[in-house]
Amino acid sequence: MDAAPNCAICNAPAYPECPCESERLQIAVKQAEQRAMDEKLAELRDWVISHSRQHILNQFERLTSTRKAAHSAYLASLPNYSIYMQYSGHPPIHPMYVDNLQRQIAEAHAELKRGIDADWRASVLRYPEVLDYFYSLVELRLPSERSPRVVEPPFAAAGYADTGFMAHSRLGKEKKKKRRDSSAAPDRGRIRDEPMQTVVGRMMRAQGPPPVPTPPIGGGYPRPPFPF
């Protein structure tokens, strides 16, 4: 008798192998990732973007502050600039000097605008590098293979017992149980020194699966109400 189970999806024979289970597993993995990771990834993304944007803005402010300081120093060095500003653009000097000064101021302002645009472009183009840096600061940690939450998940006790889980789980509780059993019943022999889960597992393997309980016939428990 071939004990290999049929496909759990379409009930096709085990040989040749049916792709249904593999395809459904990929779908289930994607759905589990979305449930477990979407919220965390959104939080991580917001953190990275926030710090990256702030870094870009800080860099841009440093560049423009230096450029604006140089621009102000240049304007202050122009002839008649101080008196021009004192009289709000209408100084008591020859119009020729005023026109020349206004042309130099306009050129300086245009150069400052070009420099600010270049600073902003240079800052924004650094986003890939900055994003990579802040993403690299995030630590993704897997639990230890010996962690009780890994070797004995809560659903392990629901219907199966695995020696791989038994061998690594509840070590501290087993030691305490050994001491308690040895003091309470010193004549139990070998079972006294073994973890209770291991003994139960050996007994289950030796005796086979437990018998299915027979439902009550007549009397017994009342019928569950519809639609239970």
Image (tube, helix red, strand yellow):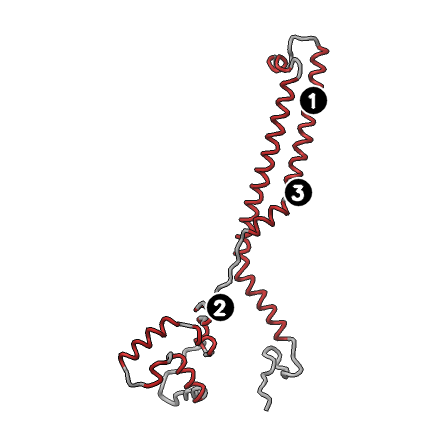
x, y percentage for residue 111? 69, 27
Mark earlier in primary sequence (2, 3): 3
Which residue is identified by label 1?
106
Residue lying at the far left of the rendered structure: 184
Image quadrant in which the N terminus is located: bottom right
Seen at 69% across and 13% down, the residue is 98
State the separation of the CA atoms marked 2 and 3.
43 Å
Q: Residue 198, position in %: x, y?
A: 41, 80
Disc 1 is placed on an element classified as helix
Residue 167 appears in which quarter of the rendering? bottom left
Q: Quadrant of residue 22?
A: bottom right
Q: Give the residue at x 35% y 81%.
A: 193
- Front in this rendered view, residue 12 or 81: 81
**Residue tagged by mark 2?**
145
Disc number for residue 125: 3
Q: What amino acid does circle 1 point to? A: Ala
126 sits left or right of 48 in the view: right
Q: Is residue 18 above or below residue 73?
A: below
